[in-house]
Image (cartoon, grey):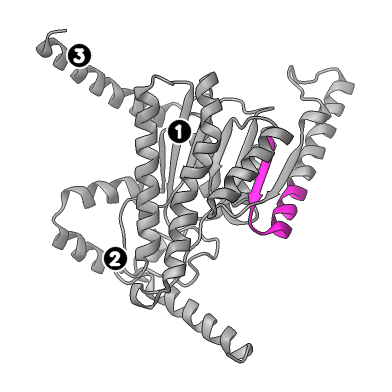
Amino acid sequence: MNIVVEFFVVTFKVLWAFVLAAARWLVRPKEKSVAGQVCLITGAGSGLGRLFALEFARRRALLVLWDINTQSNEETAGMVRHIYRDLEAADAAALQAGNGEEEILPHCNLQVFTYTCDVGKRENVYLTAERVRKEVGEVSVLVNNAGVVSGHHLLECPDELIERTMMVNCHAHFWTTKAFLPTMLEINHGHIVTVASSLGLFSTAGVEDYCASKFGVVGFHESLSHELKAAEKDGIKTTLVCPYLVDTGMFRGCRIRKEIEPFLPPLKPDYCVKQAMQAILTDQPMICTPRLMYIVTFMKSILPFEAVVCMYRFLGADKCMYPFIAQRKQATNNNEAKNGI
């Protein structure tokens, strides 16, 4: 094709992409079904991972839950089983009334499997993935959610904690994707969800290791998405989830300027996950919550660095992590005192 003609075709496609994106804001797309599909969630024992598990359970997915904490992971599984029982009871009542749903999954299909796995350890990931394939089947939806934070200033942070943050928050996505992507490529079907953070799009002081890990995983996700497009594997979808500060306790104590905080409070975990689920089930490539994060990211990209610094200082975002780090340090000192260290 002549390059001039191709240029106009590309221009039209770009403009059309804007039209489609605007249409998604005005008309809510239809959600796809994940009923009966194997959905694997890392970090499912608490926080957002647990809420993702409950949302997928309500949509009749077959769940595989990974967490390093066996007890909390089993607690999540118990909640999932309770949802499954409610769904089965509702199905039975509907069938008895003679107006059942067209598609009702049999009891054996509503199952949840739990695995204790440290996603920061490559061999642990690969061994557990092999067990999943043998005991459950191939994974259709992979939700990379597990995450940690050290809570130390750079020069006070032990090297081991920095490595741990990078392993769990970033490297683990490589291992899980390498474990389950090959089958997705064979059948050209699947969905990979990357739970990152707004701190993977713009940064702040005091959490260098966390920001680096989230920036890294955002880059990984975007490159993977381009690779799938280049391979014309349009049946494999990807969704990048970048929420603002979520009130899960992970960053307890983090504060922005008190006058601004009422307009930008920490997100409720339920709201964050529901927004993410809507994006996943409509094959939305990326979701920032709240939408203000899109504007912040755009401003950071076009403004001079000193202008960004001025904005951070006005919002109180430049040192917003300092109270959180101080609390973590105090908690560590208290634990050491109790243990007689």
Q: Residues within 10 Å of mark 3 (few under 14, many from 20)?
A: few
Going by the numbered disc 2, the residue's amino acid type is Leu
Residue bearing the label numbered 2? 315
Residue 40 in the image: above or below residue 20? below
Residue 4 in the image: above or below residue 112? above
Tell me which numbered mark, 3 or 2, is placed earlier along the sequence. 3
Q: Residues within 10 Å of mark 1 (few under 14, many from 20)?
A: many
- In front of the other: 47 or 64: 64
Residue 110 spot, x, y in % from top left: 77, 33
**Element at label 1:** strand
Residue 192 spot, x, y in % from top left: 50, 35
Residue 220 visible, this angle: yes
User: Furthest residue to the top?
Assistant: 1
Magenta residues?
60-79
- The CA distance from mark 3 to mark 1 is 26 Å
Quarter of the image for residue 310 reads bottom left
What residue is at 42 percent from the left and 65 percent from the top? 162
- The CA distance from mark 3 to mark 2 is 43 Å
Residue 82 spot, x, y in % from top left: 79, 44
Residue bearing the label numbered 3? 9
Residue bearing the label numbered 1? 238
Going by the numbered disc 1, the residue's amino acid type is Thr
Tell me which numbered mark, 3 or 1, is placed earlier along the sequence. 3
Q: Is residue 211 magenta?
A: no
Residue 278 in the image: above or below residue 255? above
